[in-house]
Image (cartoon, rainbow, N blue to C red):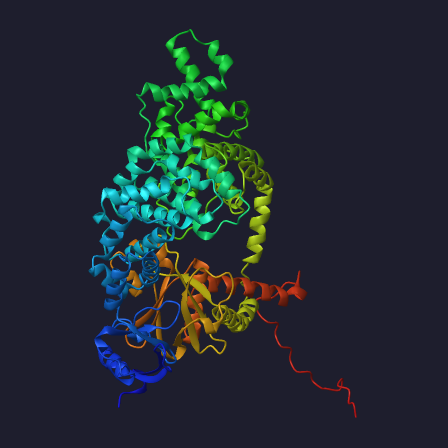
Amino acid sequence: MPPPADIVKVAIEWPGAFPKLMEIDQKKPLSAIIKEVCEGWNLPSPETYALQNADSTNFYITEKNRNNIKNGSILRLTTSAAQMALQLHERIQSTSMDMKLDGLKDLANSSRDITFAQEFINLDGISLLTQMVESGTDFGDLLSFTLTAFVELMDHGIVSWDTFSVAFIKKIASYVSKSAMDTAVLQRSLAILESMVLNSQDLYQKVAQEITIGQLIPHLQGTDQDIQTYTIAVINALFLKAPEEKRQEMAHILAQKQLRSIILSNVIRSNKPINDEMAHQLYVLQVLTFNLLEDRMMTKMDPQDQAQRDIIFELRRIAFDVECESNNSGSIEKRKSMYTRDYKKLGFINHVNPAVDFTQIPPGMLALDNMLYFARQHQDAYIRIVLENSSREDKHECPFGRSSIELTKMLCEILKVGELPSENCHDFHPMFFTHDRSFEEFFCICIQLLNKTWKEMRATSEDFNKVMQVVKEQITRALTIKPNSLDQFKSRLQNLSYTEILKLRQSERMNQEDFQSRPILELREKIQPEIMELIKQQRLNRLCEGSSFRKISSRRRQDKFWYCRLSPNHKVLHYGDLDENPQGEVPHDSLQEKLPVADIKAVVTGKDCPHMKEKGALKQNKEVLELAFSVLYESDEYLNFIAPDKHEYCVWTDGLNALLGKEMTSEFTRSDMDTLLNMEMKLRLLDLENIQIPDVPPPIPKEPSNYDFVYDCN
């Protein structure tokens, strides 16, 4: 008799019959179990039947996934995947429109299961669907379900995207270019185009020939946020895959079509809240736009290039216009001396040949571009800063040239210019969509901030790096509130003066203050276990509330979710698939799968996770690796997670380690421990404020010679 671990008790349904309670031996072949079930209901040809999960997924049970069957699962005896694929293959070619529509509807639903998908693809099903699309005879729901089935089948990564004809691409592109198109058809068509562009360089070329930015723009002017999201995703994909020499040209077209202002008015400032996927696409567009600056950022100035040298002459002319006009004549030595003096006033490091200052990369020529933009577009502020500092004789002048170069480099670091967009980031800034030259305007605000902070700090050239650190802190703190406009950003910086930064630093230092005297250290040590128990309870409570996780997929767009939560008695993990990202908690009874905590062997993270070892798994993105963890149970079974963010990752890995009786080691645990411990210490030491605590306890006095002073109550 096999051990109980190999026996699973389930209920099996069959239409028109009472459900059958069975014990499934996991060591027996699945075909033998199906044969036994069929014999119980006197069904012939057991090879044409299969078992299926009787839940919202309806996924087939196979030898690969049968270990996911848990005690108490409800299964359904149904037509095998091969038979179902054959039937649907015939039904979708029916001459009866009703039968064809029902067949396509069932196909769209069944195609989410990789077992069925493989069988349908083996029947050359993808080719059949593409022929149906190319024929152009189907419209409305027929076309919508055809495209949905196609997207679901391609999502499994079984068939290469390179196999599709130009006729198919033209047909999909035509659905996008039409002004009045069914919403579902348009959404699927945009999704297909995005996947084509991202998965094949050859298809990128073909799609780019068929679709223009002008055809995509109208879809952003509607009110359907899903359509807007898919449209921006296609634009991003075209941008990402475009050769470097074409990206500037594409950016110019986007500017001509006023993409930025359309997104600002129809998406960012619309009445609807921006969902995570839209936020991600806006972030990607922001990153790709700023990455256009990389070429200038990595271009050194050629000191011999007259056109580039003329830009420096222009900076000098704007700043010292009157002086320049009165010194057009004179000896070469006199003019050189005059230029050297002016370049020193402009704050360049190399006064003789300032072109040398721009040979450092980054920021290269981008710094000079910013300086020229500031000088031309904000001329009064530029002249004021240059003349104000050039007239000072107390060594407190702020060098405009050097500051501009270092500031440009800093802004590129803050905005990560040149880095590819992250898979899971939603960190877009609305203010960068409010101006066509947002980076240059960003620089203009920050260079004025730098000059203001320099004066507040009464800095000298020796304090240059300190000033830059303070300015960086001012900028990053102002960006954290996500200002809606550049004016809001400017106002926020006004409130973050050097004095305010010092106060904030002092406040944070007080919160992180570490008392070093021996009695305090002993008290901290005594309190620490209580605080750790409190953190542990909080982590377990969060696991009981549960979280939703994105399903692992080969496609970049991962819009499928599953939910996991711990039972209130901390003995079982409940989990199951969801149709969409939930807004609140998902009840236990709607989660079909269970994993007893007692069965968990270990928790692994990062590169050790099996879903991170798979070939091409999410392109081994560094950020995804940092958010991945897996629960090992039984012998070689894993429950794989990718946390939505670092906070959820820490909560879940801490909670799972706490369940296993292991130490919670995440950085959030350390942070929580420091915060709670310092707070508790301050509360306990409140009465000792301004009292000096000795490093060693006072000595115990000697015993008195007599105890006559003791009062006898009796």
The reply to whether residue 360 is visible in this rendering is no
Q: In the figure, residue 71 lies in which quadrant? A: bottom left
Looking at the image, which residue sits at the far bottom? Answer: 714
Identified at 25% across, 46% down, the residue is 200
Q: Is residue 198 left or right of residue 444?
A: left
Location of residue 52 with respect to 289 vertically, above or below: below
Q: State the image coordinates of residue 343 (x, y, percent, origin top left).
A: 43, 22
Q: State the image coordinates of residue 379 (x, y, percent, origin top left).
A: 52, 23
Location of residue 348 with respect to 527 vertically, above or below: above
Q: Is residue 409 left or right of residue 507?
A: left
Of residues 155 and 539, the one nearer the viewer is: 155
Q: State the image coordinates of residue 594 (x, y, percent, origin top left).
A: 40, 75
Q: In the figure, residue 54 lies in which quadrant? A: bottom left
The C terminus lies in quadrant: bottom right
Location of residue 52 with respect to 622 vertically, above or below: below
Of residues 445 and 281, the one nearer the viewer is: 281
Identified at 24% across, 50% down, the residue is 131
The reply to whether residue 435 is visible in this rendering is yes
Looking at the image, which residue sits at the far front? Answer: 96
